[in-house]
Image (tube, rainbow, N blue to C red):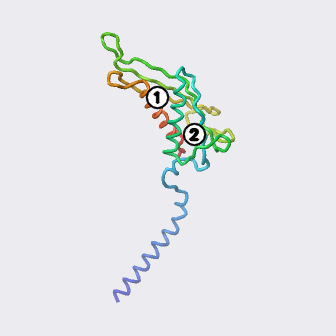
Amino acid sequence: MTTRRTIFWHTWGIAIALLIGVVSLPGCLGYRFGNAGLYRNDIRTIHVPVVRSDSFRPELGVLITEALQKEIEKRTPYKLSQSATADSVLTVRLTNDAKRVKSEVITDEPRLLETVMNVELSWTDRRGMNLIETRFMPPGEVSHYFSERTDFVPEAGQSIATAFQRAAERLADHIVDQMEARW
């Protein structure tokens, strides 16, 4: 008798668990897993033209472009594409770069230097709609501004080239962070 009751309640328990699972399933259908859940699902391809540089160091535009393309391929579900076939375009302009002395020795030789890079960017779809969402931008504004600073010590074997490379990689990281969809 007790085994029949046990089987009866066990069967009811399984039936109720299945019913709860089936009822709650439609509420979970909108969830996406992995990094695809972090990014817009209406964009599949992106075109990143070479960064236009207002600098006297023309190689910085190419440096930022390469870092940005690598970061997009590594972290996002977007595929890089030509401008004619891309769903969106990420346009970046290097507006300023500088090298500053932060610390020097008693003989006026630089000990610690800083590189600064400022960029302006816009990410738009084929219709020209802004794809980076932020609540701090005034309506109608499509340009976003990013700045990155990197320190280097020449005495330790660091150079301005490696400092700008590090700054470009950090800048690309910040830009891709902003490409994530808002909750």
Question: Eyeballing the image, is 6 above or below 70?
Answer: below
The residue depicted at 47 percent of the width and 72 percent of the height is 18
Name the residue type under label 2. Answer: Glu
Q: Few, some or many C-alpha atoms within 10 Å of disc 2 (few <14, some 14-19, many ≥20)?
A: some
Across and down, in percent, residue 130 comes to 63, 38
Placement of the N terminus among the 4 image quadrants: bottom left
SS category of the residue bearing label 2: loop
The residue furthest top is: 107
Name the residue type under label 1. Answer: Glu
Compute the Cα span from label 2 to label 1: 21 Å
Question: Eyeballing the image, is 140 above or below 4?
Answer: above
Across and down, in percent, residue 39 comes to 54, 47
Q: Is residue 116 left or right of residue 44?
A: left
Label number found at residue 133:
2
Q: Few, some or many C-alpha atoms within 10 Å of disc 1 (few <14, some 14-19, many ≥20)?
A: some
Circle 2/circle 1 CB separation < 8 Å: no
The residue depicted at 61 percent of the width and 49 percent of the height is 42
Label number found at residue 148:
1
Q: Is residue 105 left or right of residue 86?
A: left
Across and down, in percent, residue 11 comes to 43, 80
SS category of the residue bearing label 1: strand
